[in-house]
Image: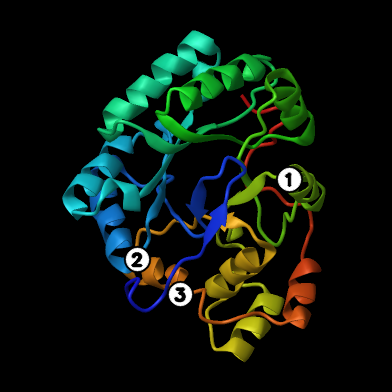
Amino acid sequence: MTTDTISIPYLDLNDRNRIPQLGFGVFQVPPEDTSEMVLRAFETGYRSIDTAAAYGNEAGVGEAIARSGLDREDVFITTKLWNNDHGRDSAHRAFERSLRQLDQDYVDLYLIHWPVPCQDRYVETWEALCELKSDGRARSIGVSNFMVEHLERVTDASGVVPTVNQIELHPRLQQEELRRYHSEHGILTEAWSPLGKGMLLDDPAIHEISSRHDRTPAQVVLRWHAQLGNVVIPKSATPERIEENFQIFDFELTDEDMRAIAQLDAGERTGPDPATFG
């Protein structure tokens, strides 16, 4: 499976850049396996890779880019600043470390990984990211796991609206209020843990829909994200699943399917609460 047969749509960011709607996440991919997994993703057709300083595998992503033979402009790299690097000077140092690990001159998207409200330094940190965007080494900047109050504070302080908020989002945690805020303010919603760490794959409603479309449960859930307009970054370490997750743009869920999945929302997190984490 390659981009010769399936083309990934791009979505517009509020700074006039664009991001592939489907990316490949490397959370919990061991550093020694990262290069091969990312190469497999490139061979499948992915062009967006999502990593983070905290994952410890930025170097493997950089190695895969070098080995792939792809033009740098054809690859979209996202990485993130970790919690203990909040603050203006720390953020600049953390960004330099990430560039060195990735062996790149710039990244396409740089995110604050968590707001860490107990530190109350995310506004200062966001201002540092604005500086990185101004000098061109972070083509776009955004946040991850921010709640409405956090988004409002950084925007009010800087006048710069994040391009993206990457949040835990899946049918059991649909974050409707936050997604509505994003839509009203030109922020793209990007979903991490889009399959709910696998807990959706055995859901009877998802299975019924997947049977009707002759698709896997994972493909149905990822297609649901796509039709909502989310950017989605599934992660897999198996070649078969990497290819399966890529094949979501050649079918469409019905309005009835979308309504059935909407009924699955239960407010269930698989990860930490952004209000208290950090």
Q: Are marks 3 and 2 in contact (CB under 8 Å)?
A: no
Check disc 1 and report the residue beneath it. 182
Front position in the image: 277 or 10: 10
Q: Secondary structure at mark 1?
A: helix
- Residue at horizontal 56 percent and vertical 56 percent from the top: 11
Would you say 239 lies left or right of 93 here? Answer: left
Percent position of residue 193, x then y: 57, 52
Q: Is residue 47 above or below residue 64?
A: below
Earlier residue among tags 3 and 1: 1
CA separation in Å, label 3 and label 1? 27 Å
CA separation in Å, label 1 and label 2? 28 Å
Check disc 2 and report the residue beneath it. 45
How many C-alpha atoms fall within 10 Å of the one at disc 1: few (<14), some, or many (≥20)? Answer: some
Front position in the image: 66 or 35: 66
How many C-alpha atoms fall within 10 Å of the one at disc 2: few (<14), some, or many (≥20)? Answer: many
Name the front one of labels 3 and 2: 2
Pick out the residue farthest to the top. 89
Q: Quadrant of the C terminus?
A: top right
Q: Are marks 1 and 2 in contact (CB under 8 Å)?
A: no
Q: Amino acid at mark 2?
A: Gly
Q: Is residue 247 above or below residue 11?
A: below
> Where residue 228 is drawn, which disc sits there?
none
- Residue at horizontal 41 percent and vertical 20 percent from the top: 94
Whether residue 200 is visible here, answered yes or no, is: no
Percent position of residue 79, x then y: 44, 36
Whether residue 7 is visible here, answered yes or no, is: yes
Name the front one of labels 3 and 1: 1
Check disc 3 and report the residue beneath it. 247
How many C-alpha atoms fall within 10 Å of the one at disc 3: few (<14), some, or many (≥20)? Answer: many
Earlier residue among tags 1 and 2: 2
